[in-house]
Image (tube, rainbow, N blue to C red):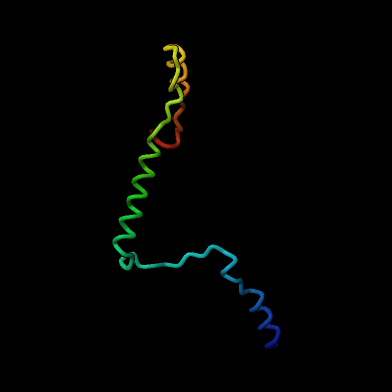
């Protein structure tokens, strides 16, 4: 019976290295440099979200420029 239980336990044990596993940490133990670096990266990403490329750049005709600018679509799920 013990041998049967051991084999069942071995089958139920999954190696963590095969999966993305996160561990809980205390945020107070993180160094200030790391926190400020992460904050700067998040702020930079937020600035990039609001940037819209000008697809009409380099158009000679004002009518073409207006038409191409009108085609610049905004993602309705981003909230702007």
Q: Quadrant of the N terminus?
A: bottom right
Q: Residue at x 36, y 44 (%)?
A: 44
Residues 41 and 12: in front is 41
Residue 50, position in %: x, y?
Answer: 37, 36
Q: Is residue 31 left or right of residue 74?
A: left
Q: Residue at x 33, y 52 (%)?
A: 39
Hey, which quadrant is residue 47 in on the image? top left
Q: Is residue 55 left or right of residue 19?
A: left
Residues 54 and 26: in front is 54
Q: Quadrant of the C terminus?
A: top left
Q: Is residue 43 above or below residue 19?
A: above
Q: Is residue 40 left or right of residue 7?
A: left
Q: Residue at x 42, y 67 (%)?
A: 24
Hey, which quadrant is residue 10 in on the image? bottom right
Residue 68, position in %: x, y?
Answer: 47, 19
Residues 21 and 30: in front is 30
């Amino acid at each position: 019976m013990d041998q049967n239980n051991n084999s069942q336990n071995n089958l139920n044990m999954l190696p963590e290295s095969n999966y993305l596993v996160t561990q809980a940490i205390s945020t107070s133990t993180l160094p200030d440099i790391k926190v400020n670096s992460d904050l700067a990266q998040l702020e930079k990403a937020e600035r990039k979200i609001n940037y819209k490329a000008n697809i009409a750049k380099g158009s000679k005709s004002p009518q073409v420029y207006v038409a191409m600018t009108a085609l610049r679509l905004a993602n309705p799920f981003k909230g702007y």
